[in-house]
Amino acid sequence: MTPPMTTRSVAGRAGALLRMRQQDEQAHSREGEPPAAGDDDGFTLAEVVVSIALFTVVSFAVMLALVTLVKLTGVTQNRVAASNLARQEVERLRGQNSTASQLDAAALTVALKGTNFTVTPIMSPAATATCAPGASRKVTVKVSWQDSSTRTVRYDTVLSC
């Protein structure tokens, strides 16, 4: 049979429990282990909602950066293709160039990977004029294409006659 509990015995037992817990925490801290978790066993709903919101914001920022990168990559690919077409046109005109011949300066359209490029050579003196020996002809090749706006690449050179 247990004696009836008085206020003094309840306080004594609570104090004993508190001392035992402090001794347990000191023992764990001496061993290098963290103290008992107590009531912090998980995440609260507010912490979960905030972490999901932060993850969503970061995800959208990364997605926007990737979309912009893909768009810029397409623009760069078209710019490189246009530069190559301009260079090829200049090489073709170099092959035709001589003192007695007239150059073919007609504009042409080339389709590459679903994009239409317009290649336009401009010459001074004109392509239909003969070029005197020792003279030179200024050649500008413009390549334009349409994506989100009209874009142009220009290639300038001088051909000797």
Image (cartoon, rainbow, N blue to C red):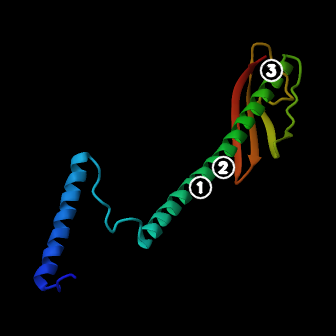
Q: CA distance from mark 1 to mark 2?
A: 12 Å
Q: Position of residue 137 (x, y in %)?
A: 75, 24
Residue 158: % across, % down: 71, 23
What residue is shown at x 57% (from left), y 52% (from top)? 65
Split into 4 quadrants, where in the image is the C terminus?
Answer: top right
Q: Across the whole image, how many numbered discs are drawn on residues?
A: 3
Q: Which mark is residue 71?
A: 2
* Residue type marked 1: Met
Q: Which residue is mark 1?
A: 63
Residue at horizontal 50%, vertical 65%? 52
Residue 62 in the image: state x and y as whole percent.
55, 53
Counting residues from the start of the chain, the first of labels 1 and 2 encountered is: 1
- Residues 57 and 92: in front is 57
Q: Residues within 10 Å of mark 2 (few under 14, many from 20)?
A: few
Which residue extends farthest front?
1
Residue to which mark 3 is pinned: 94
Query: For the residue marked with disc 3, what is the amino acid?
Result: Arg
